[in-house]
């Protein structure tokens, strides 16, 4: 069984800096909280004014870029910088000359390229950027030097492995399927195929999850983004915190014209809570983060405030709503019927999920207090048993009660 004890997102875009005699070189990962007050000194005087700068030649189709979320947040000047960095990253250029006189801005936009393009598995966000200021009349510019995690030859080998695995995975779902079916397919595939492993190599990119099958939340979320984009689903890579402090990554997806949160990492199986004894390790997918709205995800997740995110207000395509396990209020007859139906069909588990805290508490008290015993008696009679074992998982922070029967 896979065990997930929270998610630890390695900081993709960190920064370190070194003050040289000739200027300030920014080194690190573009998450620049610590550098905002230090970049005014980060300008190197060019020895020759009016020199011709070998800016990155851009051939990328702007129409295809416009489909990506973080690109769409930029103004026209920033979009030019984005295109130049994108082109250089795509070509795995050692130095990318861009129309930008601010190393901090360059690093931030490199981070936005990586958020939009999980394809660029050969760079996890490490970058060394130097801004140059020419004499009056000259044009300021920045040289961006990304840190690549594999050689050019290894990149091509890994790309072939990723393409082969992607083709195999996508054979399991039709391009004619609905957005919900595609999202559910990818959600279940990733949960069932990837092991959560803090020590997994390349765990900040899709190579770890798609090929290595071991990763952390960055790998999970980038694989979801990568696969869903190829299925024609609009998807956004999101970073923030979980449980108040832990750095985390997940996705926003567009389904039925509305945005929903999807967290494949937290869909992995977890230990269950038993009644009176240690519960067996039931292996099942957790669907609490399969298409949920802001209120649902907000119980445990908080997106970074640095970027505005589309509002997620609908619940039409929430997994529990679609499958009739989401309740607006507690109804004893409906609860007992759900338990008995599961027993008749020999299914596990039976899930009750409530948005209203009071309804959840009433359901918990009555289901565990009396209804479950009535259902257990039915189980004895149907299967000719002298005793029945059942286990439950109580998740008050999610408004969810899960019952497991031992058949």
Image (cartoon, rainbow, N blue to C red):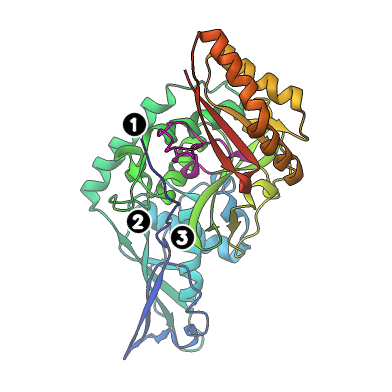
Residue 271 among those drawn in magenta: yes
Q: Give the numbered dot on residue 84.
A: 3
Precedes in sequence: disc 2 or disc 3: 3
Is 149 placed above or below 268 here? below
Q: Is mark 2 on a helix, strand or loop?
A: strand
> Which residue in the protein does label 1 denote?
165
Disc 1 to disc 2: CB gap under 8 Å = no
Give the residue at x 64% y 42%. Answer: 260
For mark 2, does the 10 Å Cα neighbourhood hold few (<14), some (14 to 19), or many (20 or more) residues? many
Return the residue nearer the eye: 27 or 272: 272
Q: Nearer the viewer, residue 313 or 6?
A: 6
**Number of other residues with Cα within 10 Å of mark 3, as a class: few under 14, some 14 to 19, many 20 or more:** many
Q: Residues within 10 Å of mark 1 (few under 14, many from 20)?
A: few
The numbered mark at residue 123 is 2
Res. 152 visible in picture: yes
Tell me the SS state at disc 1: helix
Residue 154 shown left or right of residue 234 in the figure? left
User: Where does the image place residue 342, in percent across and percent down from the top left?
Assistant: 59, 18
Q: Which residue lies furthest to the bottom in this view?
A: 21
């Amino acid at each position: 069984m896979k065990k997930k004890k929270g998610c630890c997102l390695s900081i993709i875009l960190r920064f370190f800096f070194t003050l040289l005699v000739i200027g300030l070189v920014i080194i690190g990962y573009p998450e620049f909280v610590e550098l905002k007050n230090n970049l005014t000194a980060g300008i190197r005087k060019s020895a020759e004014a009016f020199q011709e700068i070998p800016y990155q030649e851009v051939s990328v189709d702007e129409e295809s870029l416009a489909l990506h979320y973080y690109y769409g947040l930029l103004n026209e000047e920033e979009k030019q910088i984005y295109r130049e960095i994108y082109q250089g990253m795509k070509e795995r250029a050692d130095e990318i000359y861009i129309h930008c006189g601010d190393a901090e801005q360059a690093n931030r936009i490199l981070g936005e390229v990586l958020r939009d393009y999980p394809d660029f598995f050969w760079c996890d966000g490490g970058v060394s950027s130097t801004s140059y200021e020419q004499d009056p009349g000259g044009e300021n510019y920045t040289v961006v030097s990304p840190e690549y995690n594999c050689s050019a030859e290894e990149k091509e080998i890994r790309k072939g492995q990723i393409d082969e695995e992607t083709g195999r995975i996508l054979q399991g779902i039709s391009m004619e399927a609905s957005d919900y079916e595609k999202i559910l397919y990818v959600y279940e595939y990733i949960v069932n195929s990837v092991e959560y492993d803090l020590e997994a190599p390349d765990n900040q990119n899709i190579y770890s999850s798609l090929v290595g099958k071991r990763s952390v939340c960055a790998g999970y979320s980038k694989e979801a983004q990568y696969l869903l984009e190829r299925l024609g689903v609009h998807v956004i890579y999101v970073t923030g915190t979980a449980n108040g402090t832990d750095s985390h990554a997940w996705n926003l997806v567009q389904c039925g014209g509305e945005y929903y949160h999807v967290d494949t990492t937290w869909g992995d199986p977890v230990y269950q809570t038993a009644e009176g004894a240690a519960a067996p390790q039931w292996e099942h997918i957790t669907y609490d983060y399969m298409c949920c709205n802001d209120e649902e995800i907000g119980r445990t997740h908080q997106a970074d405030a640095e970027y505005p995110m589309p509002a997620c207000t609908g619940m039409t395509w929430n997994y529990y709503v679609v499958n009739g396990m989401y309740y607006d209020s507690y109804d004893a007859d409906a609860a007992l019927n759900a338990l008995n139906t599961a027993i008749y069909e020999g299914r596990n588990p039976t899930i009750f999920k409530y948005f209203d805290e009071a309804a959840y508490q009433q359901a918990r008290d009555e289901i565990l207090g009396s209804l479950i015993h009535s259902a257990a008696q039915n189980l004895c009679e149907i299967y000719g048993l002298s005793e029945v074992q059942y286990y439950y998982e109580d998740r008050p922070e999610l408004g969810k009660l899960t019952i497991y029967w031992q058949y």
